[in-house]
């Protein structure tokens, strides 16, 4: 084999190795984590736990739409980062089916037991509260979904907690 052919093979091998390395690095992208009630979920900035959901008849003046039932669950969020940040109630989307409109967010807080619309959480501290949502009468499971995002706004890791009703 000539020196020119050897250098060409060497160059092609280096390029193929580089392409393979870039492809492998791309495979380390966003992941999805699934949990159940009372299991702690670990995100990049905080840990959160959703208690078991329960159907309740009424709550402090919240109107339940016709054909729906009122569901309540407790959520706990602990800041595991070195910085404070804001937690928004609506960051935790509630899903109850496969349809395009089978999701929503919890009701706005009507008392101190419910998770507030937005709350600052300092490093090491824990935020707790109840989330209430109206779901269709035939709903048997509720999924709490949290989606991390990168600084550029693109989706990062996703977290799902399945709750039975």
Image (cartoon, rainbow, N blue to C red):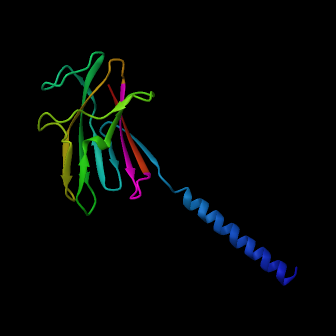
| Residue drawn 61% across the image and 65% down it | 21
Q: Is residue 165 above or below residue 11?
A: above
| Residue drawn 42% across the image and 27% down it | 97
Residue 146 within the magenta-colored segment of the rendering: yes
Q: Is residue 118 above or below residue 82?
A: above
Q: Could you say where residue 131 lies in the image, as x and y percent from the top left? A: 23, 35
Quadrant where the N terminus sits is: bottom right
Q: Nearer the viewer, residue 68 or 113?
A: 68
Question: Horizontally, is 135 left or right of 113 in the view?
Answer: right
Q: Could you say where residue 117 lies in the image, as x and y percent from the top left? A: 21, 42
> Could you say which quadrant of the image residue 153 lies in?
bottom left
* Residue occupying the far right of the picture: 1
> Could you say which quadrant of the image residue 57 lies in?
top left
* Residue occupying the far bottom of the picture: 3
Range drawn in magenta: 141-155
Question: Horizontally, is 155 left or right of 13 in the view?
Answer: left
**What secondary structure characterizes most of the magenta part?**
strand
Residue 70 within the magenta-colored segment of the rendering: no
* Residue occupying the far top of the picture: 67
Question: Horizontally, is 120 left or right of 3 in the view?
Answer: left
Q: Could you say where residue 62 lies in the image, as x and y percent from the top left? A: 17, 25
> Could you say which quadrant of the image residue 51 lies in?
top left
Quadrant where the C terminus sits is: top left
The total number of labels drawn is: 0
Q: Could you say where residue 148 lies in the image, as x and y percent from the top left? A: 38, 50
| Residue drawn 38% across the image and 28% down it | 96
Q: Is residue 11 above or below residue 64?
A: below
């Amino acid at each position: 084999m000539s020196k020119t052919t050897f250098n060409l093979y060497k160059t092609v091998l280096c390029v193929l190795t580089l392409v393979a390395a870039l492809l492998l690095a791309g495979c380390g992208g966003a992941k999805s984590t699934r949990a159940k009630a009372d299991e702690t979920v670990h995100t990049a900035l905080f840990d959160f736990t959703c208690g078991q959901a329960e159907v309740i008849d009424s709550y402090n003046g919240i109107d339940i739409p016709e054909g729906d039932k009122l569901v309540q669950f407790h959520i706990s969020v602990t800041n595991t980062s070195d910085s404070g940040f804001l937690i928004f109630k609506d960051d935790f989307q509630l899903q109850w089916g496969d349809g395009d409109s089978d999701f929503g967010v919890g009701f706005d807080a009507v008392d101190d037991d419910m998770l507030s619309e937005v709350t600052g959480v300092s490093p090491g501290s824990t935020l707790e509260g109840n989330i209430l949502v109206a779901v269709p009468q035939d709903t048997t499971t509720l999924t709490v979904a949290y989606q991390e995002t990168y600084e550029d706004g693109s989706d990062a890791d996703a977290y799902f907690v399945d709750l039975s009703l």
